Image (cartoon, coloured by chain):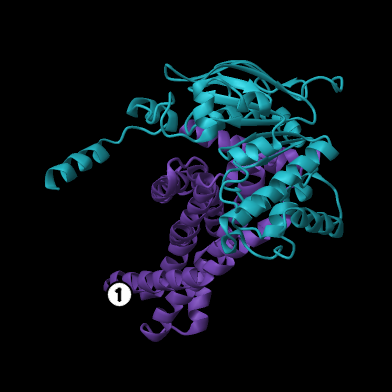
Chain colours: A cyan, B purple
Amino acid sequence: MSPSPDAPVIEVSDLVRRFADRAIINDISFNVHRGETLVIMGGSGCGKSTLLRHIIGSMKPTSGSVKIFGQEITTMDEREIALVRRRFGMLFQSGALLASLTVGENVALPLVQHTKMPPDGIESVVKQKLQMVGLSGFEDLKPAEISGGMKKRVGLARALALDPELLFSDEPTSGLDPIMTAVVDQLTLKLTHGEHMTAVVVTHDMTSAFRIATRMIMLGHGSIVAQGTPDEIRNSTNPEVHQFINGEADGPIPLNLSQDEHEHHQHVKPRPFVAARHRFHRKTA
Amino acid sequence: MLKNYLKLNLSLLYWVFVAPFTGQFFSISQIFRQMVFIGVRATSMVALTAFSIGVTLAMQAAHSLQQLGAEMYVPDLVMLSILREMGPVLIAVIVIGRSGSAVAAELGTMKVSEEIEALEVMAINPVQYLVVPRFLAMLVMLPALTIFGNYIGVLGGWAVCRFALNFNTAGYVLRALQSANTWDLYSGMIKSGVFAWIVITIACNAGLHVEGGAEGVGQATTSAVVQALLAMLVSNAILTGIFFFGS
């Protein structure tokens, strides 16, 4: 059942996902090995989040394969996916805390649901995880009572509650101040180096990306524009990569998606009233 | 839409009746939390509704029966109408407006704020964690509220008979009890159990399939209330047909 220790933790091969006739993910392949931190970057709407959703099994690809811990996730049923998911943690962009539970109950949730730990054992794990993200003593507050950055850190504590072998983070540092960003980055480094955790991080934050990455992938229009070690990316001669990591407004990356592409991407239905309202405002202005 | 609804019902049946035997229990404390919200907090509204209905029924009955000189049958009419029809239906209406909309809005908000997805990624089944406690709480509390409402409704009828029609209390109670048999009560209870199922599954289904932000939550809440009301009234007609008109 368990593959050899050198086998990749994540194997994505020839992954394709189409909405209507447009490929959101266009033939992507890569491997992630144990202890690595893979950073996935790319402009807004390039398919980063969609790619992540395919890897964690919440979306099914049009074709191609995704293996986690050596098991093919694209053909699994819900129950099999649930078993795999107990082995990884995921930090959502918004934190995605349950609003009806306190901070402490949120962090405790995976422990309560998936382990037979006694309540005081759970309490001490919750304390320890919250301390790791610098939020000791916040157990009894509700998510609505803390800031966006704090929610994200609670989300990280919750993702780490079961000591996962694999951590997915969707923009872990957006909305955090520079000091907290460094704390979260150090935590990721400590876990990947010390505990041999594997991390897949989607981010826009270049400082943080170069600090934690052992390998980087840059996406554009659903395919891989460049991949390599941080040094290779930094010294890349590819003009798109250069523009992106240096944050330049002018360059080969188009500023706007066409309206058509944008709508496909957001899966929103076209809204005729909005267009009509725009026309009306233009006339009356 | 219908496919999602049937799927929700199947998975609900699995998590309530099959999963506990494989060691995957639902949380009892969650059920009690929902019972307090769905049931206990609705008692005052239910009491006021049921009392008004009891009073109204008695007045209408008195008005018609007086012309025939048959006021003594007012308790019969109040008792039977409340046990068989008015109690289960009107209390379900109150619960749809109060708890059905709240459940749809709550689950819908959780859906749009990625909370449902987060549960799935934590390998927690949203049906087991969110729907099962609400379903079981509703299945217990709607019939319980109906029994409570039946009492209050009959009390409303008594108020009219005692103070406007000069019945004595014992006469009213005896007449009312003589008129009804246990089947009248049970048929109302069966109805209210069926309504509970319909209301909570429609509300949860609407909430779990919200799309498109705050606007979507609003639409889902409205459609949950409308669909639940229609489904409840249609099933009431069918059940009345089966119980009292079939044989």
Can residue A87 be seen by looking at this rendering? yes
Residue A178 percent location from the top left of the image? 62, 51
Amino acid type, label 1: Gln
Mark 1 element type = helix
**Dividing the image into 4 quarters, which one contains the N terminus of chain A?**
top right
Q: Which residue is mark 1?
A: B66
Q: Is residue A60 above or below residue B91?
A: above
- Name the foreground residue: B67 vs A58: A58
- Name the foreground residue: B234 vs A225: A225
Residue B137 percent location from the top left of the image? 62, 56
Residue B64 percent location from the top left of the image? 29, 69
Residue B83 percent location from the top left of the image? 49, 62
Q: Badge 1 sits on which subunit?
A: B
Q: Tell me what residue is drawn at x 84 percent, y 20 percent.
A: A6
Q: Tell me what residue is drawn at x 20 percent, y 39 percent.
A: A276
Can residue A58 be seen by looking at this rendering? no
Q: Tell me what residue is drawn at x 44 percent, y 76 percent.
A: B156
